[in-house]
Amino acid sequence: MSDFYSNVIQGAQNLHWAEILATIFGFIYIILAIKENVWCWFWGILSCGLWAWATYNLYDYYIDAVLNVFYVVMGFVGIYQWKFGSRDKKQLHVTQLSVNQHIMIVVAGVALTYLLGYLFDKYTPAQKTYLDAFTTAFAVFATFMTIQKKIGSWIYWIIVDMIYVYMYWAVGAYLFMLLFIVNTILAVKGYLNWRKLVVREYHLS
């Protein structure tokens, strides 16, 4: 256990400035997203831009780097959708997905996982390609769900963040493992908060 703590402290001391800012901005994003605040996307754009650089240059998670570039683009889409994405061009409300929609997402996510995993395993020196592909595939779908304010997005984020905990533990990045543990806890809180909004909307309708 002492080795674990020493590795965490050492990891914190060796952090690149981009990782520090990406982490801080990422936490701001999650906290504001939980509160359904549209400004979360601004901080998400900054965080993911920095993470794209860090995951590519520091950890050789190439698929994750591409994913973070995708997040940056989707951040601008998220700002528009949250502000004007409803049918009456007013602020979007939190809603749920059907069981069939979840099944389609899972099937498509598994298929995309195998495709990305195979391509990056065969043609790049990236690490843990299939796990990286899994988190990428389902994070993409979770992002689209978040943009549409679907409460189920938090469930996918919880799973993805838990896998990231293992991925960063596997490469000895214990500090980032702890950060994704925090992200997992925040995602649980996000689900519970959005669920309250869905219940409130149901009673008001």
Image (cartoon, helix red, strand yellow):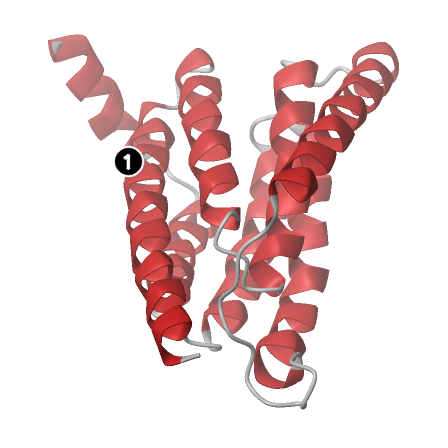
The answer to which image quadrant residue 26 occupies is bottom left
Residue assigned mark 1: 12
- In the picture, the quarter occupied by the N terminus is top left
The answer to which image quadrant residue 62 occupies is top right
- The correct choice, above or below, for 109 with respect to 42 in the image is above
Tag 1, which secondary structure? Answer: helix
Residue 15 horizontal/vertical position (percent): 38, 39
How many numbered markers are drawn? 1
Residue 108 horizontal/vertical position (percent): 77, 31
Q: Residue furthest left?
A: 2
Q: Identify the residue shown where x is 54% and y is 57%.
A: 150
- The correct choice, above or below, for 42 with respect to 142 in the image is below
Q: Callout 1 environment at 10 Å: few (<14), some (14 to 19), or many (20+)?
A: some
Q: Identify the residue shown where x is 62% and y is 64%.
A: 148
- Amino acid type at image mark 1: Ala
Q: Is residue 199 visible?
A: yes
Residue 117 horizontal/vertical position (percent): 77, 18
Q: Nearer the viewer, residue 1 or 161?
A: 161
- In the picture, the quarter occupied by the C terminus is bottom left
Q: Is residue 36 visible?
A: no
